[in-house]
Image (spheres, rainbow, N blue to C red):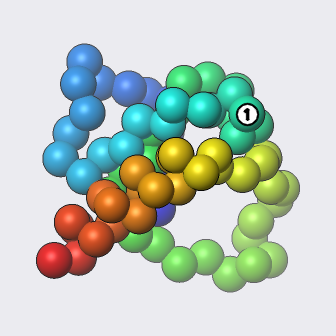
Amino acid sequence: MAVTSQLRASAALGEVWLQDWKSAGLLKPSAIKPVFATLERSLIIRELGALSTADREALRKAMREALE
């Protein structure tokens, strides 16, 4: 899913605002947008970090809702 630091005034449908963006290694407050994509591993330049347990659970919930 797409990660962006361009936040709106309020979260859009299916969008997850990351609460622990700093500990995830992100540079700015960020959100995950409900846009699914598949990338080849060779296209990944670097890994910034990992989502906290709370942010992972919020993402899972949003994904379940998007796929229903």
Question: Residue 27, how many percent across, how many down?
Answer: 70, 27
> Would you say 14 lies left or right of 63 here?
left
Question: Residue 7, how many percent across, how many down?
Answer: 38, 26
> Would you say 53 lies left or right of 32 here?
right
Question: Residue 43, how many percent across, how many down?
Answer: 74, 70
Res 35 seen here:
no
> Would you say 5 lies left or right of 60 here?
right
Asked if residue 66 is positioned above or below residue 24 in the image, the reply reads below
Q: Mark 1 points at which residue?
A: 23
The amino acid type of the residue labelled 1 equals Ser
Tally of numbered discs: 1
Identify the residue shown where x is 61% and y is 23%.
Answer: 28
Identify the residue shown where x is 51% and y is 31%.
Answer: 19
Which of the 4 image quadrants contains residue 63? bottom left
Q: Quadrant of the C terminus?
A: bottom left
Q: Which of 44 and 47 is in front in this view?
A: 47
Asked if residue 55 is positioned above or below residue 63 in the image, the reply reads above
Label 1 sits on a secondary structure element that is loop
Mark 1 crowd level (few <14, some 14–19, many ≥20, 10 Å Cα): few
Identify the residue shown where x is 21% and y is 39%.
Answer: 12
Res 48 seen here:
yes
> Would you say 14 lies left or right of 50 here?
left
